[in-house]
Amino acid sequence: MVISKKPLQFILAMTMALMPIVNFANSTNDSTVVEAHAAPKTEEVAHEEGHGHAEPTDIKSQVKAFTKHHVLDSHDFTLYSDFKEGKHVGFPLPVILWDNGLHVFSSSKFHHGESVAESNGNYYVINHHDGKIYKTDEKGTIHEDEKTGHPSNARPIDFSITKSVLFILITAFLMFFIFVRLAKSYAKNGGIASGFGRIFEPLVVYIRDEIAIPNIGEKNYKKYMSYLLTIFFFILFLNIFGLTPLGVNVTGNLTITFSLAILTFLITNFTANKNYWGHIFWMPGVPKLMRIVLAPIELLGVIIKPFSLMIRLYANIFAGHIVLMSIIGLMFIFKSWIGSTLSFGLSFVLSILEILVAFLQAYIFTMLSALYFGSANEEHHHEEAHH
């Protein structure tokens, strides 16, 4: 099947042109309340005395706090916060904890981190430094380790539906909806795509013809296509969500990129042929003494490959969010038409660059995964051709 690259170029161009239009509200859509870290109050005390945390008064501290909390996960989804009025527009998410039993309650009990949540006689608070839930007493006391400065309170096992988890589920549903419809359209129209799915057909064909087949080979590429397509669109959609005013940072979370890298690692090693392991532990074509020296080095490379996948995706997305939020924050620091205009223009250009990075990182992760799969299925006669 021959297909022009012009549709793919058109999709990328249109996406890059349209996305910056809705990208500049990131600074106001932080889902974590930026407040001083006073001890949280119980629900009753919070309602009687008002909020237990004061907003930072210095504009630089506010910008720094917003930038820091923007990249953290959150147990609620807040679209907008008015600190002066104490109002938060959004909705709570379910909190699911395992602490000597299952505890399920709404994150609204935390009152955006200002109150202590009680569940079956246990008390929990959200620490504003890291956004994690800790077990406390009724007063919400957080004890800090003198050496590390981190909370020393016990942490329950957290299975909560956080903001990142919510967007992972949304992305999964969106992908399922799009590609099921695309597959059905193929069946109905004799192999011709129709409807909304036609937008993604050039990307599917590109991954097959330019990534999977060249790197894995005609013989083995089909068994990896489902994973390669899933990982590409999963990363791409989450990257694009991160550039919208929703303010999500899923692929800039190290645990998410670690999980994706582990999947590639497991698939590579569990589907590898004996030639792959033979090259690692007893490399052909070199002296036997060198084989003993090279074996641990090659084995270390097996671990380094997924590690590089994890760090590359995490670092690029995380750094992009930090830089973009910092530049947007300069508009509030300068408070002049010259400085604010320059900051706005720079953030606009950077937003376009971030859209390119969103596509590029999805492509690189998929390409490298295909390379690893190809090396794991390389036939022995390829090696013999060199000797």
Image (cartoon, rainbow, N blue to C red):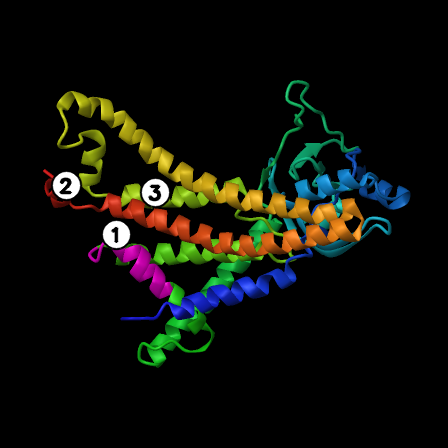
Question: Could you classify mark 2 by the number of other residues whose Cα lies within 10 Å: few (under 14), some (14-19), or many (20 or more)?
Answer: few
Q: Is residue 249 magenta?
A: no
Residue 136, label in figure? none
The answer to which image quadrant residue 127 occupies is top right
Can you identify the residue that label 1 sits on? 216
Can you identify the residue that label 2 sits on? 383
Q: Is residue 205 magenta?
A: yes
| Residue 71 located left or right of residue 117 | left
Provide the residue span drawn in magenta.
Answer: 204-219
* Residue 170 drawn at (x, y percent): 55, 59
Question: Could you classify mark 1 by the number of other residues whose Cα lies within 10 Å: few (under 14), some (14-19), or many (20 or more)?
Answer: many
Quadrant the C terminus occupies: top left
**Rounded to the nearest whole Å, what is the CA distance between mark 1 and mark 2?**
16 Å
Question: Residue 325 or 51: which is nearer the viewer?
Answer: 325
Q: Which residue type does callout 3 highlight?
A: Leu
**Rounded to the nearest whole Å, what is the CA distance between mark 2 and mark 3?**
24 Å
Whether residue 186 is situated above or below residue 350 in the rendered picture: below
Quadrant the N terminus occupies: bottom left
Question: Could you classify mark 3 by the number of other residues whose Cα lies within 10 Å: few (under 14), some (14-19), or many (20 or more)?
Answer: few
Q: Which residue type does callout 1 highlight?
A: Ile
Q: Nearer the viewer, mark 2 or mark 3?
A: 2
Q: Residue at x 28, y 43 (%)?
A: 270
Q: Residue at x 61, y 42 (%)?
A: 97
Can you identify the residue that label 3 sits on? 266
Residue occupying the far top of the picture? 147
Secondary structure of the residue carrying tag 3 is helix
**Rounded to the nearest whole Å, what is the CA distance between mark 1 and mark 3?**
17 Å
| Residue 188 located left or right of residue 338 | left
Label 1 vs 2, first from the N-terminus: 1
